[in-house]
Structure formats: C-alpha cells, structure tokens
Image (cartoon, rainbow, N blue to C red):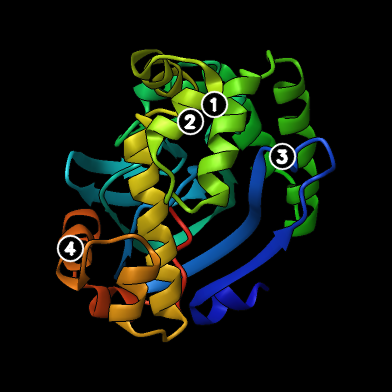
Amino acid sequence: MDDTAATGGLTSVEGRPGAFLRPYVTELTAYTERYEEPLTRRQPPFAGVVVIFGFGEPLGLSGPGTRGRLASFAGGLHTTYVDTTTAGVAEGVQVNLTPLGARRLFGLPMSELANRVLSLDDVLGPWAGTAVERLAATPGRHDRLALLDALLTRRIHAAPDPDPRVRWAWQRLRAARGALPIAELTGELGWSHRHLVSRFHDQIGMSPKAVARVMRFEHAAARLRAGLPAADTAAACGYYDQAHMSRDFRAMAGTTPRQLAGLWPERPIAVSG
C-alpha cells in the first residue's frame, strides 16, 4: 500500500526529461497526496506553464479571474496568484514547460492561456483524455514518468518549431532575470515594439514587459526564500525601492514579501501563475 494513501500527505518522484524535451520541459513530477481536511496552497506566478495530468479528486482552483474544480488542467503564464485546494486523494503527473514548449504542445496562441486555467481537454482535445487514461492505468510513478515523456516527445516533435527570434528574446530575458530594457531587444532584433509584442503574445502569452515583471518577481522570491535581506533584494532585482517590491508582491502574490517567503519550504505542486 502506498504510504501516502495510508497516512496522508504528499509523496512524489521527479523525472529528468529526455534529451529532446529538455529545452521545453523544466520539471516532470509524479505525485500522490491525501488529506482528510482540505489543504489550500497559494501558487505564486512563475515564468512557465503548468500542466496537470490528474486522476482522483479534482483540485479546487481560485484566485483573481479563476474559479472551479479540475483534475487535469493547464495554467498559462500568470501575473497573479492561484490558490489550489486539495481534498481526499489526488494523484497524477505535473509537467512544467517553458512557454515555447507549451506553444508546441498545445498548438494554440499562448495569449489564450494567459492568466487562465483551462481544462486539459480544452487545450489538448481528445489527446488529453487518452493520455490521462493511459497514465492512470500505469502502475508506478517511474513508469508514469517514462510514459508521459514518450507521449510528450511524440506530440511536441510533430509540431512546428518556435520562432527562433522569439526564442532568442525569451532566453535573453531569462538570462537577465527580467532586468533588460525591452528597447534593447527590439533594437537587436530589428523589430518594432508592436511586432515584438505581437510575437510574444502568440508564442509566449504576454508582452515582453509583463514577462520581465514575472521574471523579476520570481528572482526576488527566490532571494527572499534563501534568507537574503528585502532591501538588498529589491535593489538586486531592479525595483525602485523596497516599497515598490512590496506593491508588486501584493499585486502578484496577494501577500507581502516576508509572508510569501514564509510559504516555503513546502513547495507548491499544482497550478502556478
């Protein structure tokens, strides 16, 4: 018997994506969790897309612009938080993708998922149901990870490559943790600002400015989790001052920097923004 099913709590196994998936998949986790009383977690935004192939009890989802209960779903790039509530037994596989990986997987403009959480059937059609059925019928978390790796590889491999110029711009922003003037990107690409925004909405889901804001928040949150001072973090992450960082945290995470750092070490496993 699974220890989680017997005693409650969370158990999980992480997998390393295969070579083809590594540019697109940043995390692959098979999990089981059981709680006698509902457990709610706050999922702050991060610079990626979350996909849950779930079986068992659906998760409750709530937050600015989000409400419902889903077992299998996709959450696009967010600029605000989503709260998830787990009750009973939830089981499945979580995949964190880069936005460009999600664009290949879904075959949809990523703006359709921005600040939204959608049923997996809505973004992947019948393929989603087939994948969930096969995963649920596969015993063992390691085997589930191997199966999903194979399923994702086939689907993404068959999709068109992302725009290499958008991929380059995304990587530049990622390397700078969002601290890069957007005018610098347009100048190096030779694109107008309007064209860059249009390409980002299609391939990434948001404007470069919004993406940079999420990356800056993510960098600041990581520093605070590591115990670094808030004032130093604000300066290192490009905020005007500590008050500016606090306002951004309240808007994006619904809490203060100090309170958000206190949400760890228990790591969110479901949807993120």
**Figure check: 190 above or below 78:** above
First in sequence: mark 1 vs mark 4: 1
Q: Is residue 162 above or below residue 88?
A: above
Can residue 129 be seen here?
Answer: no
At label 3, the amino acid type is Pro
User: Residue visible at 66% across and 43% down?
Assistant: 25
Q: Which residue is mark 4?
A: 244
Residue located at (20% from left, 49% from top): 63
10 Å crowding of disc 2: few (<14), some (14-19), many (20+) = many
Give above or below for 129 relative to 139: above
Residues at marks 1 and 2 touching, judged by CB atoms closer than 8 Å: yes
SS for tag 2? helix
Name the residue tied to disc 3: 23
Q: In the drawing, what numbered circle is on residue 185?
A: 2
Q: Please tell me in which quadrant of the rendered image residue 78 appears.
A: top left
Residues at marks 1 and 4, CA–CA distance in whole angstroms: 29 Å
Pair 2/4: label in front:
2
Residue identifier under label 1 = 188
Q: Position of residue 46 (x, y in %)?
A: 42, 52
Residue at mark 2 to residue at mark 3: CA–CA distance: 21 Å
Comes first in the chain, label 2 or label 3: 3
